[in-house]
């Protein structure tokens, strides 16, 4: 079974014309680039239908007012002066990510980690920007405006007109308007862990850069998706004006399990790296993930069900600002194939089992 | 493994909105119908990308000269009076199909069948039509004009202008012109056994009806594709003018193996039916194939890699006449998934093996 799955990884990358980055870890992106937005037909035929990402150059957003206005330090805080927004707070910039379980069970080795959601607070937008800029894992507080509930057309409606309401060539190709349009404001401390979305995604960077690690859905097994108990950061102390919050992690009650990738592609220490590599060999020994940096003005089409890990670099204004458009995906034969693949345990057949898969059985070691 | 594969069958039919025919075997077709040809974008989005067949009503070909001219008894024989064409001759109407091995190996139980190709003869077109009309399995000779080498633009170039040179909405959607355009002339005695093509196919009936049994590529295992030694019908006697040929089957030398479906969905006798049902339970016990009858003037879009079995009824002129357009398929993630599925033995894992799969192991019994 493992051999068949590895063959699938290799063939799907070959057929998509997507090869992994240069071995030096450089910025060479294998994602196809277009200088101009594609026609709806070419987009559908060459990208949506085959499930192939596309990076469109900044020409596509040159007409957006946001392109010139949002990088300006004062424009957004002025426009949203009295707007309350949802700010996501974590101690380390890892919202919706695995974290050490606050009460690990001594006799259950698989219970050392949980799935941690951010502490979400409504603050006025100028405060949100200040907290994002002051984010510091050393001080135990990182703020990220990443409310993913169509927030650009909700909380941020006052500035929604600065960007296109939808992506015309994508809407025409997909035959619908976006289900959600989200705004993301953070800085280098915020990281989004490996996950996939049930949407076709058009991701546009307005300020700074976003760094994507991508894996096609065929490489599902490399992510070691397991069920983790859900937890949430809560405020540990009464808050005083101007005093930074202290956050602590609380398990959700009643218990709720969240399937999430076990893999951290950037372990913080050599020891963690060794533990990850030994626990998750299909990720660390397999083909390198496809790297793609999206610069200000550029648009990334990320096909539905692709796994992505996102980190970011701020622009000159100290912020990474992005907008994304989620379009309903088509649940078709590709989706059925994905579910079939996911239903297979890579070590289903004892004849194929080998030492390299020990990590898969042992789930985690950190 | 078998459970996971059955789940894939069920989910892919659900997602494609394709359910099997009515249990009474009636003509209720589950293939989506359109009264008018789709736009290129809708065709690509709703049919090519998800891999979903489409039947387009006769309105699409009303402007073809072939629609009015070809059903006429004298038009084609006049237009092709002095044209030599390739005629495919078999004793029973089953070209490119399994046949009893002429020299079965007594100690190799899997060697009782071979893959038989027709005896191909160049005859003038009026003779071809006469032989097709006189086809009679009882007399041991069935003729079928089914040269699949772009023959409408080759041997039949004189009448190629009677149909559209390509299918405009398909060409625009797929971004290319047809790789091949073929003409098919036969009658009710000719049957095409289950197979798949590496093309997107637009199949147009001009006279009579074609009856398709369809299975999506996800149902690969139900076809029991196995390697069979290739054989060819040859003329057994010196031919005299006006004398019917006698055909006999000769194994190809050197031996050549052809992977082909072991399943005959219409066994000729109750005994053969019982043998087939016991040897190929995944086909006979699984969901009914999708039935689709294409009538004169109608077009069937058959996505690449779909398995199809085709039988036919003649029109008032005694002939079934059809034209098909083969477009290069896109080798994308769906193709990689298919190859992965195909690489899995449904009884790979001994824990899942059960009595229902005996036929799979035993290959054949007839």
Image: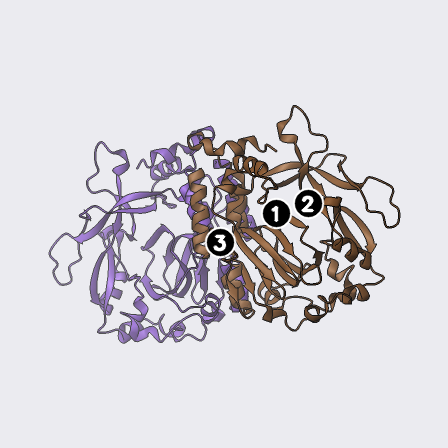
Chain colours: A brown, B purple
Which of the 4 image quadrants contains residue B364? top left
Which of the 4 image quadrants contains residue B295? bottom left
Q: Position of residue B156 (x, y in %)?
A: 29, 71
- Viewer-closest of A132 and B233: A132
- Marks 3 and 1 sit apart, C-alpha to C-alpha, by 20 Å
Mark closer to the observer (2, 3): 3
Q: Is residue B119 above or below residue A38?
A: above
Q: Are marks 2 and 3 in contact (CB under 8 Å)?
A: no
Q: Are marks 3 and 1 in contact (CB under 8 Å)?
A: no
Q: Which mark is residue A96?
A: 2
The residue tagged 1 is A195
Q: Residue at x 18, y 53 (%)?
A: B234
Q: Residue at x 79, y 56 (%)?
A: A130
- Subunit ID for the residue under disc 3: A
Q: Which mark is residue A21?
A: 3
Q: Position of residue A212 (x, y in %)?
A: 58, 54
């Amino acid at each position: 079974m493992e051999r068949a799955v590895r063959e699938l990884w290799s063939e799907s990358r070959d057929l998509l014309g997507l090869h992994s980055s240069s071995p030096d870890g450089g910025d060479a992106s294998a994602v196809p680039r277009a200088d101009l937005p594609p026609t709806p037909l070419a987009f559908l035929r060459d990208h949506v239908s085959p499930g192939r990402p596309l990076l469109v150059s900044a020409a596509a957003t040159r007409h957006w007012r946001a392109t010139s206005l949002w990088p300006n330090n004062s424009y957004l805080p002025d426009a949203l002066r009295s707007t309350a927004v949802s700010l996501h707070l974590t101690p380390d910039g890892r919202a919706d990510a695995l974290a050490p379980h606050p009460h690990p069970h001594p006799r259950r080795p698989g219970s050392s980690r949980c799935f941690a959601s951010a502490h979400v607070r409504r603050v006025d937008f100028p405060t949100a920007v200040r907290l994002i800029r002051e984010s510091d894992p050393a001080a135990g507080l990182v703020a990220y405006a990443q409310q993913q509930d169509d927030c650009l057309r909700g909380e941020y409606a006052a500035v929604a007109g600065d960007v296109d309401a939808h992506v015309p060539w994508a809407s025409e190709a997909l035959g619908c308007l976006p289900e959600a349009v989200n705004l993301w404001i953070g800085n280098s401390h915020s990281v989004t862990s490996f996950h996939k979305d049930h949407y076709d995604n058009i991701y546009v960077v307005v300020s700074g850069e976003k760094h994507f690690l991508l894996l096609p859905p065929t490489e599902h097994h490399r992510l070691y998706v397991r069920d983790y108990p859900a937890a949430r950061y809560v405020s540990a102390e009464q808050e005083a004006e101007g005093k930074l919050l202290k956050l602590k992690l609380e398990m959700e009650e009643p218990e709720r399990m969240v399937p999430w990738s076990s893999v951290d592609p950037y372990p913080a220490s050599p020891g963690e790296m060794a533990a990850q590599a030994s626990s998750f060999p299909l990720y660390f020994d397999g083909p390198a993930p496809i790297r793609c940096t999206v610069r200000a003005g550029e648009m990334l089409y990320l096909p539905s069900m692709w796994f992505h890990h996102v980190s970011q670099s701020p622009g000159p204004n100290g912020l990474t600002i992005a907008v994304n458009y989620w379009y309903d995906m088509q649940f078709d034969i590709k989706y059925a194939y994905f579910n079939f693949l996911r239903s297979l345990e890579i070590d289903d057949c004892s004849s194929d089992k080998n030492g390299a898969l020990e990590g898969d059985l042992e789930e985690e070691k950190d």
